Amino acid sequence: MKKLERNDPCWCGSGKKYKQCHMRLDEKIKTFELEGHMVPDHSMIKTREQIEGIRESGKINVAVLDYVAEQIHAGMTTEEIDRLVEEKTREYGAIPAPLGYEGYPKSVCTSINDQVCHGIPSEDVVLKEGDIVNVDVSTIYKGYFSDSSRMFIIGRTTPEKERLVRVAKECMEAGIAQVKPWQFLGDMADAVNSHAKANGYSIVVDIGGHGVGLEFHEDPFVSYVAPKGTEMLMVPGMVFTIEPMVNAGTEDVYVDEADDWTVYTDDGQPSAQWEVTIAVTEDGYELLAW
Ligand code: MF3
Ligand code: CO
């Protein structure tokens, strides 16, 4: 690739000169790279316009989850949740991102109790009092992707499951608090993992978060178990998910062989997950979907 000169048009397509656009940012990134750190390439740094697009997509994602929150109740099937998500998303002129994604058959993921993620909505699965369920919604709007999920407690549950749901949310929030430019994804991960461990829980290692925005799943892979100072440098314009899966027992998981999607905990103990789409800004972060 030809080195950009100061007066060349910027790589981001703004039409501005490189020196008046992303040049300083690129120079700063370079210093971290020379120190041996992992740094994002240009494809991972969104422009203002792209972030605006993801923000609009995220608003729909949030509205769909708010709608699910109003409607979810004991006795309903997860198939009904799928229908709610599908209909609400279409009402906004958007597309449910999961539908047809790598052959995924539904518009949303619904993961109950010891299901860690990627549970497939079904007419045969009825929500019952005491269940804890993750509803994971992802939206495509005008070509922009957003992704967030929440836990719902059906009626009243055990103190153990209630604590798991609460701590899983706190883990995500601890991660969010560490999102600042020129820190590392490992700083965020360490905050998540430390909070889980302090509460006697484990974080799933093999499945993580991801860049998001122009596609459903982009680089980088986002770990929630990495040590401080490791993993990729966070740079303004990066957009990714924070979505740690928090297990009451072992971190080990397996994929259901029958449907090839649903992930379960190995020991049958419950798992909880909350997810946001977050952008790194000049001075911290902006939540784009929650
Ligand atoms: N929304 C999930 C995530 O957070 C992805 C689900 S993949 C699908 O990455 F195919 F099930 F949609
Ligand atoms: Co995600």
Image (spheres, rainbow, N blue to C red):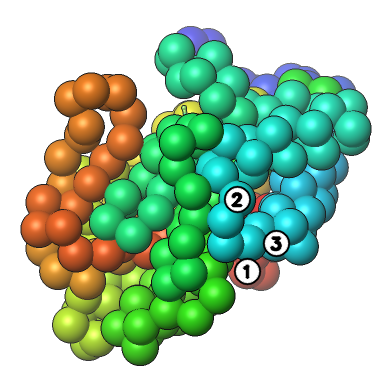
Q: Is mark 1 within 8 Å of ligand 2?
A: no
Does residue 3 appear anywhere in the picture?
A: no
Q: Which residue is mark 3?
A: 69
- Residue 290 vs 60, above or below: the answer is below
Question: Measured from the top left, where is residue 20 in percent x and y?
Answer: 79, 40
- Hey, what amino acid is under mark 3? Ala
**Residue 275, how many percent across, how many down?**
52, 57
Near mark 1 (Cα within 10 A), the count class, few <14, some 14-19 or many ≥20, is: some
The residue lying toward the viewer, choosing from 183 and 289, is 289
Task: From the viewer's perspective, tell me whether residue 72 is left or right of residue 127.
Answer: right
**Could you classify mark 2 by the number of other residues whose Cα lies within 10 Å: few (under 14), some (14-19), or many (20 or more)?**
some
Q: Residue 284 has which mark? A: 1
Residue at 81% x, 44% y is 60
What numbered label is drawn on residue 76? 2
SS state under label 1: loop
Q: Residue at x 31, y 36 (%)?
A: 262
Looking at the picture, tell me which residue is in the foreground, 278 or 72.
72
Q: Nearer the viewer, residue 106 or 2?
A: 106
